[in-house]
Image (cartoon, grey):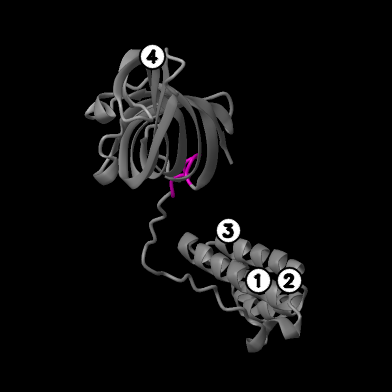
Amino acid sequence: MKRLVIVFLALLLPVGLTIVLEATPSTAAIEQLKQIKELRDLDILTEEEYQAKRNALLKQLDMQIVEEKMEPEAIQPDNIMEPEEKLVGPEVTITEIPEQGIWEGRWYVGGGLHYSIENFRNKLGDYNLDDTWGINVNIGYIALDYLAFDLRFQYHNQFKAKESGTTSHLYVSGTGEFSMQQGNYDHTVTLRAYDFTLNIKGRYPMDNIVPYAVVGTGILHGKVKEEYSFNPYSWFAAPFYETYSESMSDMCMRFGAGGDFLFSDNFGINFEIAYNIGYGSVSNIRFTTANIGVVHIF
């Protein structure tokens, strides 16, 4: 009897599978799995056959569920999205660009007072002139943090030498007689000068202190004036006064060092010492300037 049941079930298996497949996916799955399990329990199917049929059934069931849930338009060839293609190209190395210096590309103006210490060659005709004060203004451009260009004007008030004393002069009277007359004399020599120079500065910024070295060249103009007066003691001799002046211009150079001491990013005090030397017709004019001033950086 048992064998007849087994044969009967084996004959009904294809029909049962067909009926189950026409059912809903969830119902079919349960029924088919039950039938396969019963066949394994009755030793009609081995364990390996049972696992193979079970896996095939589950795979077929998954595909059926997916097809039922998808709309017809969704499975059309035109609506199937191709996987994105990943473009592969040469590797690009990104190099970080260093931040521009805080001084580079900025303009500045300045001005101040200076003291000019004379070092005239040949003492301008053996006259020992005194030192003088002066004023200066400048405008510059910081091309790089460590390099700047500077246009500078300097005015030197008056280098002066004065001598007074007693001396004698030869006089000729109206009758043609010669006589030596004594009296007081004053002899004054002055030099006023100014210069325009284009300078190059080598800078070394250090926080709020910017030391620098400077070299420049330009035009130096000077005017020498000599005055002489004599007052004789005698009432019969007349005093006299003589004056002489000469102007000259030529090339000059300056060499120096200094520093900007900044209170903020835009404002500070400037100190500078420079040696100035003339050439050509102004080769006798040489002096050292010690400057103190202000600087404003835009």
Check disc 1 and report the residue beneath it: 61
- Which amino acid, mark 2? Pro
Residue 41 numbered tag = 3
Q: In this rendering, which labeled residue sits more in front, label 3 or label 1? A: 1
Tell me the tag on residue 25. 2
Q: Are marks 1 and 2 in contact (CB under 8 Å)?
A: yes
Q: Say which of 263 and 167 sits in front.
A: 167
Q: x, y (%) of residue 193?
A: 42, 36
Please state which of the two labelled residues, at mark 4 or mark 2, is closer to the viewer: 4
- Judging from the image, what secondary structure is the residue with disc 1 in? helix
Give the image quarter of residue 188.
top left
| Residue 193 vs residue 216, the one in the foreground | 193
Residue under label 4 = 183
Q: Position of residue 253 (x, y in %)?
A: 30, 40
- In this view, the residue farthest toward the left is 122
- Total numbered badges shown on the rendered structure: 4
